[in-house]
Amino acid sequence: MSPSAAAGPAAVAALPYPPDRPGPLRAAAARCARLAALSGRVADDLAHDGRLLDGCWDGTASQGCAAELRAATRVVRSLGDPLQRSGRLLADHADVVRDAGYQVDALRQDYDDVLTAHSARVDRLLHDTGLTGPLRRIELQAAQDSHQARLAALHRRHEAVLEQVAGHARLTGRQVRSAAASVVPGRRSDGRPVGDHEARLAGLLPLLAAMRSAAGVRGSPPPHGSPPRVVQTWWSALTPDEQERMVRLHPSELGRLDGLPGAVRSQANEQQLAADLAALRARSALTDDERRWLRNCELVQQQLGRVRSDEDPFSLAQLTAQLLVFDPGAFGYEGRAAVVVGDLDTADNVAFLVPGLNSTIDSAMSSLTSSALRVTQDARRLSPYETTATVAWMGYDAPGLGNVGSDGAAFDGGELLLGDLLAVQASRVVQPHLTVVGHSYGSTTTGTMLRDHETGTDDVVLVGSPGPDVEDAAELRVPAGHVFVGASSRDPVSYLDRFGDDPSHESFGATRFEAEDPTRNTWRLDLDDHSKYFNEGTESLSNIVHVVTGDYDGVVRAPYRHETWLLPDGINSDPETDRDPTSR
């Protein structure tokens, strides 16, 4: 075959193909739908604020503020229909991209078939002893001409597919732009449009002054425990320079304020962390408490750096690390901290990992952060067009063996967990898919909280649980069918029933998933198997990640445990005992 003959196949093979997965388009369409629903709620909130401000003061400033709020309400309310239309348009284009992918796959197969057939024909002609030299050359040239013609036809079909996708993309872009242009800008009482620069400036200045006055913009943050809505209003009324100054001058106060964005709290907490480290390291001698304080600070700093040294498995970008909670002197210097793997302000999915007995910053922060890293990265691999933030929540005074008999630690810890869950939700406009994963006594703490409070939690996962402080899954305030349980047949803690019923029994009403570890003890209960639920490649980690991402069809169910008459609830009553574990 001549060099010119080979150019045809190479040219066809080098053509760009359209994306073979329309995932980003479908994700964008889904976000449009969520934002469309949100726009109505935000408009209602703005209208409510307008009614609250009515009658608060009189004069030009009052009129300007009321006009701006009415205009803003109209603009926000008008977003719903364009967003819905844009979502439908993007979903339609995703179908076009998907169908084009199928066509390209078929063309690739045709291309391979053409190459195979041509190679066989040339080989046959070369080895045909009945052909003379001149006749063989004629037949080979004819075969080559036919081959080039078929490749050219494939080339034209491929270009047609690409042009079809490109044409539909251009049409979709025009339609989305048209939908965006239909947003009602709103008009003032005198008929002038909101876009008029002078009128807009005149209206906004009194509004800004009123907001700052109402928010109590002064030289210090609101006190700890202020309602998140008050904190949000105060923060948004500050200028960027004022916000930067607040973080610099009041890091410890800002780090504890519910309602601030996660990134702001993290910046404040990390500034306090750096200040603590500098002050402690500068001292010539430290007390025992100060040494524990320093140790907690160093460990938290190490985990933040460890997260940031890793990368997103899909985008290969540096992972985001945030410090949601930082109180190294809490609980007699055992410490309270929450290191986040991911961005709490933007993540589609947020998971809180709640640890069990004897968990302190010193003893468990490193292993808990490892678990959070695995959950976030495996969630990205499973659902690459969504983002996940996992909170390594060392946020309560976990009991030791000496005081585990009381559920007081679970109640107190549940109150702290509730505060941090609500704080994350209060700081966001679009709410994430929220999962709480409680391990060991952490499942008791989680169950106590969900029994007593409405938390906004979508899913709860109980692993290695000695009991979630309830007798029935229906007592946990999450949507029906969204309580999941992982219990290894070799984990002795999961058989204790110390705090409520064993959730791995059918009567409890939860979904039990497979949670055996390939490295489990082969013949007996083993306390080591209590700490394997987040190990890399395990059944348990895989199923936890499916729940965290909302992929419930991917959760592999396990048969429930049962009671054996006259025998204690133990390994002999678990159907999972004899199944060979798998690595995932």
Image (cartoon, grey):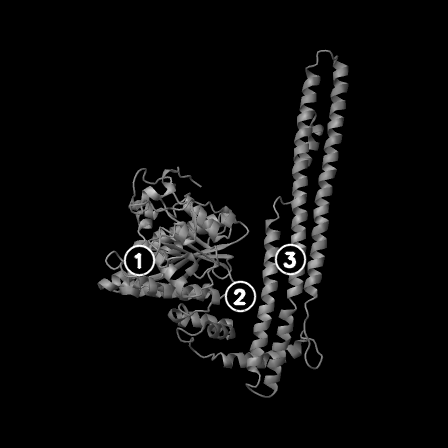
Q: Nearer the viewer, residue 56 or 68?
A: 56
Can you give x and y, in whole percent of width and height, for residue 222 in the image? 42, 76
Element class at badge 2: loop
Residue at screen point 39% across, 38% down: 579
Q: CA distance from mark 1 to mark 2?
A: 33 Å
**Mark whose residue sits in front, 3 or 1:** 3
* Picture layout, residue 175 above or below residue 140: below
Can you give x and y, in whole percent of width and height, for residue 180 in the image? 68, 63
Circle 1 crowding by C-alpha within 10 Å: few under 14, some 14–19, many from 20: many
The residue furthest front is 565
Q: In which quadrant of the rendered view does residue 160 lie?
A: top right
Element class at badge 3: helix
Q: Nearer the viewer, residue 80 or 313?
A: 80
Q: Mark 3 or mark 2, which has the lower sequence index?
A: 3
Can you give x and y, in whole percent of width and height, for residue 237 in the image? 51, 75
Q: Which residue is mark 2?
A: 429
Q: Nearer the viewer, residue 73 or 339?
A: 73
Q: In which quadrant of the rendered view does residue 287 lie?
A: bottom left
At label 2, the amino acid type is Val
At label 1, the amino acid type is Thr
* Picture layout, residue 323 above or below residue 225: above
Residue at screen point 50% across, 81% down: 214
Circle 3 crowding by C-alpha within 10 Å: few under 14, some 14–19, many from 20: many
Q: CA distance from mark 3 to mark 1?
A: 46 Å
Res. 352 in view: no
Q: Mark 1 or mark 2, which has the lower sequence index?
A: 1
Q: Which residue is mark 1?
A: 360
Q: CA distance from mark 3 to mark 2?
A: 19 Å
Q: Which residue is mark 3?
A: 87
Element class at badge 1: loop
Res. 354 in view: yes
